[in-house]
Amino acid sequence: MNVSGMHFFTHENILSRYPDTLLGDASRRKKFYCKDYDEYFFDRHRPSFEGILFYYQTGIMKRPRNVPVEIFVMELKYFDMGDSVIKDLLKNEGCYVPDEDLEPENRIKRIIWDLFEQPESSACARIVAVLSFLFILISVAETCVETLPQFRTTDADLLNISDLLTNTTEPPTNTTASKSLEETISQLQSAFQNPFFCVETACVVWFTLELVMRFYACPSKAAFAKKLLNIIDFAAILPFFVTLVLIVFATSRERAALSLVVLRILRLVRVLRILKLSRHVKAMRLLAVTVYESRHALGSLFLFLMIGVVTFATGIYVTEEYVPETFFTSIPDSFWWAIITMTTVGYGDTYPQGGAGKLVAVFSFFFGILIMAMLMPIFVDKFNAMYVYEMTNPYRAINDLKPEPEDPPESTEKIEQRETSL
């Protein structure tokens, strides 16, 4: 085989190990055959072909060191080495390769799916993505602003159950259905008089519409339900509907007290809405992938930190045990000081007072700096590499490549004329 002037020799049975590739398929390979020189000629990148031929011989795909990833991937695409081989290579190179999403077969569902899942597919999809981003920001801002002292509303006032909590007598149980309905409407009207609750309602309506439309149009309901971002989307709207149920059913003192406990727990869940930004911010998704890919290095970091915390907490307790008005009354109480000292935070709420304790503190923060300096660059380098690869995105580049056009078969007359001229 002649690749841009460099000759490579191998046996045909080695190429036939992968019959779905360009070189392994004799019928596709023959159009590159040069009869005059009795060889196959490819006007392609020569250094890349060394790695491709090595794969045929050993079954191991390895990029030559002097070949950039983008060029090598394009050569693999040209020789039709297969998407699975290309994906494995990119993953081994540290590239972020997203999982392929199935496309809905129905035309209407495909339009809805692209509208909510593919912002780059159309102008309308970009508008929907911007709206979703704005609603997320408004929802997060509303959650923060409503805790200011001048806007703060107690949970009991929101549920309209202040009277139930302060009144020791239970309301009559023989109320009619019409009166119960009137009370429910009155409670809802009271809740919607709160402007923050109205903003919350508008945001949740958009989030619910977005989730329902995406669930309706998704090609696989099971895969959709298992995806982490979709679980976060569901958890982000759940507190609102639970709050509505609590407003309606908080009709007794016991139910009112239980509703307050549940509502305070659900307020924590609303913080998950900030994670919805990862659907629109690529760097957040890359950060999550980087944390997962660097889990072994991070695990080693936490292990060393734990060893240092136990060691230096014990040391500071022993050296400061008999110091008057000491802050370190036990080893577990010293864990907090060891953590903030090793991570160089240093709040100053607890500190050693004796000379031996200060010496332990010096060793403590030197040990923490050493561990962080050794292991954190692994995490940072991994994120930088993935970010750069995502910006260039060789995986998107190979998807944009057009397949090589097949040459039409020559007629018998043209073949005879060419042979006569030769």
Image (tube, helix red, strand yellow):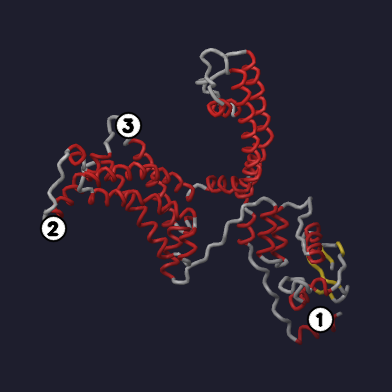
What separation in Å lies between label 1 and label 2 (alpha carbons)?
Answer: 96 Å
Is residue 246 visible to us here?
yes
What residue would you read off at disc 2? 177
Which label lies toward us, 3 or 2?
2
Q: Amino acid at mark 3?
A: Leu
User: Viewed as shown, does residue 307 lie left or right of 220?
Assistant: right
Quadrant of the image occupied by residue 91? bottom right
Using the image, determine if residue 132 lies above or below residue 264: below
Element carrying mark 1 = helix
Is residue 138 visible to us here?
no
Using the image, determine if residue 63 lies above or below residue 156: below
What residue would you read off at disc 3? 148
Where residue 322 appears, as percent x and y from the top left, is 57, 15
User: Viewed as shown, does residue 77 lie left or right of 284?
Assistant: right
Q: Amino acid at mark 2?
A: Ala
Where residue 166 appears, as percent x and y from the top left, is 19, 37
First in residue order: circle 3 vs circle 1: 3
Q: Nearer the viewer, residue 240 or 127?
A: 240
Element carrying mark 3 = loop
First in residue order: circle 3 vs circle 2: 3
Can you tell which mark lies on residue 322?
A: none
